[in-house]
Image (spheres, rainbow, N blue to C red):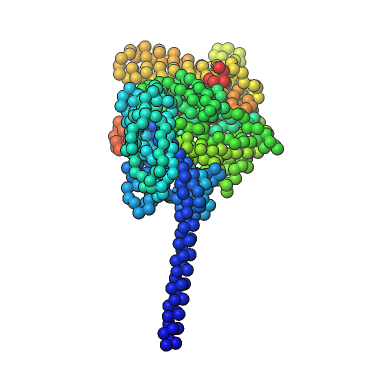
Amino acid sequence: MKQISAALLIVVLMLLTALSYASLYNTVSAQTNDYKIEKIDHQIFVMYSGNIAIIDTIQITGQVTDNFKIGLPYPYSSDVLKVIAYSEKTIYNVELGVQLGDRSGFYGAEIDFQGKSPETFTVVFVLSNSLITEQGNNRFSIDFPAYPSLTKDVGTCNVAVSFPASPTELVIIKDDGTVNDKNYLKTGLPAYTYSIATAIATMPDETLKLLTINELNRQINIDVIGTVTVNENYRITSNTATALNKFALNLPLEAMNVVVGDQSGGVLDIKQTPVSAKNILFVDVTLPNVVSKDETTIVTAQYNLPSATIQDSKYVLDEFQVYPKLQYLIEQATITFNPPEGAIIITPQPNTLGKSSTLTRTVYQDILTIKEDNISYVDYLTPDHDFIEVEYEYNPVWASFKPTFWASVAAAIGCIGAVIYRQYKSKQKIYKTGKGQLLNKQPLQSTLKREKIKQQEIIKTGQSITSDNIKEFVDSYEDKRQLNTELSTLEALAQKGKIPRRQYKAQKKAIEDRIENLEEKIETAKAIFRGSTGQYPDIIRQLDAAELDKTESEENIKILDTCLSKGEISIETYKRNIVDYQKLRNNAESAINGILMRLREKIR
């Protein structure tokens, strides 16, 4: 009997222990999942480029110690370009492609709060522009999730659909009814809601363009006195069935002296509209040529931003906005900070940079590069706002290093040239036939011209640059390029036998003489620029490098053409190599065009 009682007592104790653990587990589970979603602001933001941002701002009560899941109907999965989650002060890690609970048919995102769930946070899905269909006459059909998909019920869901400009007509068709307003409300939104909406919107002209900005290269150049000059290069592909003949650039509100050009270096017509509420400068650009669907064009921009300030002997760009509040999406963006030669970047430090940033230190210059993918308006919403602080140390002595160096080189060359010329001149003394008089043989005219240029290089070193110097240089350079074009045309006509040989030789000689005179003016101006202070020596260095690349590429192209015509190389080898040289030549021409455009702006 005692044995039976002891056994019963053991069983009872085991049951009580199991119940205690179960109760504890239920309590922990209740604590883990004991939260409510009070409200969601579900914003549908249609960008100028046709991309769509789904911005869900979520308010909860209670604690979420597990990860939080939110999603979209699965058909949108192929259009998801980027997902970010953040609260007022924190950006959270997001895992994509997860399942919502035990349900299928959704594309989920899981947010890791790391055990510190906020009361309010935001999740953003950035979608492609393939969800928008053109219907003609500025009328568009836009597909989007009518409501967010969550694993819990939602008390209230406020929905707002916004566009780059107010539509003249708007109809939103969804499962639970049609509305004619950009705002609508849903109370008691069930968990695992699967709802797709279609908005039919008629937009004002030029306010919504289906396009892809494939690449942005943004160069931030800082000169010796802290002046900030920005050079941007956009590669744009048209996705619209109608002609793309205009484009709206988004620049920082502080941008000054804006110049926009095309890939050939021509200056384009623009209209600037500052919008303080959006902290952005809209620059409407009229493209030189119509861009058809799936075609690509290049747009360049140059402007100034507020200069770097001196703080405690350091140059500082404080809270520099890496990218403005973009109203379109850029697939690949690269920004490069180029302080003056001799500068040392002290902020940011390499160990504080993210995976997409690099700090390159060379003998003469530090360069900071930042690369990002799929950037847009939503990146401006995050806590850091894509601001960066750049500090660098710079010794003004560096400003005179290159001019002094080149002046010394020029002086040395001049001295050596003078010695050689005197020796050569002494050997040219001859006796005139039939007479005993000793005569001096005159140097060649081209030799005199070269000596004159060398003397000017020495005399002009260190002088200031005037607008007349710049204008004469740019005009001479443009005239030389035009004459080279005329010479190429003349040679083509001669090869085809469309011009008499004597006329060809006479015209060629006249053009070559004019080119030679212009080259003397250009080299003289270059010598003045090289010997000056400021940014001009560096500009001429860039121009010389671009000219060398252009000359080498053109020579290599001619060699390839000759080898192909003689059968020395195969057509495959020709095609494989000609593309590289053509690209090098085009890049060099673009660089030359950009330099001339920069100089042209200085005399306006």
The outermost residue toward the front is 1
Picture residue at 44% right of the left edge, 44% below the top: 155
Q: Position of residue 324 (x, y in %)?
A: 51, 32
Side of 587 relative to 89 (left or right): left
Q: Position of residue 170 (x, y in %)?
A: 37, 27
Picture residue at 62% right of the left edge, 36% below the top: 318
Q: Position of residue 523 (x, y in %)?
A: 55, 22
Picture quarter with the N terminus: bottom left
- From where the camera sits, is residue 496 visible? yes
The outermost residue toward the right is 312
Picture residue at 39% right of the left edge, 23% below the top: 168
- Closer to the camera in the image, 370 or 10: 10
Q: Position of residue 497 (x, y in %)?
A: 30, 16
Picture residue at 45% right of the left edge, 62% below the top: 26
Side of 560 relative to 409 (left or right): left
- Closer to the camera in the image, 516 or 134: 134
To which quarter of the image does residue 410 belong?
top right
To which quarter of the image does residue 499 belong?
top left
- From where the camera sits, is residue 292 visible? no
